[in-house]
Image (tube, rainbow, N blue to C red):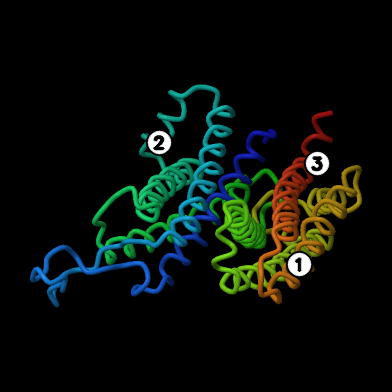
Amino acid sequence: MLGPLIVCYLFLGGTGAGACLVLAVLGLLAPRELVAVRGAGGDGAGRRPAGAHAVLRPPAAYRRFLAPGYRAALVALALGMVCLLADVGRADRLLLLLTSPAFSHVAVGAWSLAVCAVLAVLAGLAWDGLVRRWRFAAVQVLQAALALAALAVMLYTGLLLQSLSAVPLWATPWLPVLFVLSSLSCGVVLVLAAAQLTGAASAFATVLGRPAAVDAAVIVLEAAALAVFAGTALAGVGGDFVAGRTAEALEASAEALVAGEAAWLFWGGLVLAGLAVPFALDVVLARLRRPRPALALVAAACVLAGGLVMRYCVVEAGMHPLLAMAS
């Protein structure tokens, strides 16, 4: 049985990884002429030699924008690791999990989370200006590696549930798709919220409209994936993906998800507050040419709450037939 700590672990890990992916992409798209200078050297008149390598030197606006975003992402990743450690029970068990040569989704996910966190620390130090004379090309490679590690974590959070063969609701390829889209949306709004709280949004008012538009598009895709996920489960499609699955158990989970005792949480917390409301706010924010901190923070709160509710509902509905049989 998966408890609340695992639900929080899946949410926080996915959110932190989604934010790392967004920040890595934004860093890769940063204009080189604005954030890098030629390396040391020169002819005494201030001119740099033509062959000098470019060194990352982010201006104050970029430091206020990207560095706090990385700190927020690291807080989410760290809290996710704490939840995993608390669920495992003892630190030595987590160490054994990381050092075990046996392949498992949990071990791969724990390693991916750790690698993502380490790369995020290095990227955050680079954009905060705390580490001097980082080559711009090296930082670009670091950010590309971070994007891949973050994507692995986002995908893993769905694959972990899909790998649990005793739960028919999770035995569908739509579950990892849903979790990746939700993690990306949560990551986008976490970065946007950090920019609003630090005041960096005023310097990137036009640029931040694009992530808001991207989040609106991701929410549409997430809603479509959720509809297919729930619809196919209600129809009993996917119950035979793995031997031993029954369409009855799958339909029972689906009914618990959309019409059970916690259906109000699914429709009110996820569909309405987590998808419909932030989509409308994102459309407004994407059209504005100046920051609206209140709207951005409300949209971020709705998306993050919806992401947590989605994982809770999916986990609880998946375990519903098992709990019924146990009782």
Mark number for residue 98?
Answer: 2
Q: Quadrant of the C terminus?
A: top right
Q: Nearer the viewer, mark 3 or mark 2?
A: 2
| Residue 257 point in image, percent of width and height | 83, 50
| Residue 115 point in image, percent of width and height | 40, 47
- Mark 2: which amino acid? Leu
Mark number for residue 321?
Answer: 3
Q: Is residue 213 left or right of residue 279?
A: left
Residue at (41% x, 51% y) in the render: 124
| Residue 241 point in image, percent of width and height | 66, 58
Mark number for residue 279?
Answer: 1
Q: Quadrant of the N terminus?
A: top right
Q: Disc 3 to disc 2, how far (Cα)?
A: 32 Å
Q: In the rendered image of this protein, does residue 155 appear above or below residue 41?
A: above
Residue at (82% x, 56% y) in the render: 273
Q: Earlier in the sequence, mark 3 or mark 2?
A: 2
Q: Earlier in the sequence, mark 2 or mark 1?
A: 2
Q: Disc 2 to disc 1, how far (Cα)?
A: 39 Å
| Foreground residue among 317 and 247 | 317
